[in-house]
Amino acid sequence: QVQLVESGGGLVQAGGSLRLSCAASGRTFSELSVGWFRLPPGKDREFVASISWSDSSATYADPVKGRFSISRDNAKNTVFLQMNSLKPEDTAFYYCAAQPVGRDMYFEGDYDYWGQGTEVTVSS
């Protein structure tokens, strides 16, 4: 089993930055990729970014490319999502999730473990 805990959400003005953290426990992450998804108000949950634990290769959704950056700290079993130049449309609950390497990183159904989420609100 894997437990994931997100933190770092909050209220920020447009143009500001936040860094989300996803702390994992319960199992080694050497064979797991980690993704971030978000649930905007009134919309479906969507893929934001993912990172492979083995080689740190990262993938981003088009709306966040160039503004968000995903990284990980192996020693701390933690994945980060640095969010810069935030826009009101980035307002959402943000969730981290983990999956075995080799699955579809864009498909939330391929993730086995989920955190409880952290809320991000960007004011205009």
Image: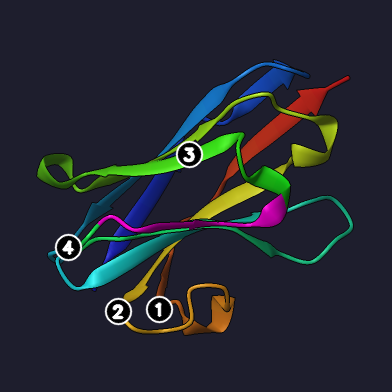
Amino acid at dot 4: Gly
Which secondary structure, mark 1? loop
Q: Are marks 4 and 3 in contact (CB under 8 Å)?
A: no
Front tag of 1 and 4: 1
The quarter holding residue 45 reads bottom right
Residue tagged 1: 112
Query: Mark 1 vs mark 3: which is more N-terminal?
Result: 3
In this picture, which residue range is highlighted in magenta?
56-62
Residue tagged 4: 26
Quarter of the N terminus within the rendering: bottom left
Front tag of 1 and 3: 3
Which secondary structure, mark 2? strand
Q: Are marks 2 and 3 in contact (CB under 8 Å)?
A: no
Where residue 105 appears, as percent x and y from the top left, is 48, 73
Q: CA distance from mark 2 to mark 4?
A: 15 Å
Residue tagged 2: 100
> Which mark, by number, is residue 69?
3
Query: Mark 4 vs mark 3: which is more N-terminal?
Result: 4
Q: CA distance from mark 1 to mark 3?
A: 23 Å
Q: CA distance from mark 2 to mark 3?
A: 21 Å
Which secondary structure, mark 3? strand
Amino acid at dot 1: Asp
> Which mark, by number, is residue 5?
none
Q: CA distance from mark 2 to mark 1?
A: 8 Å
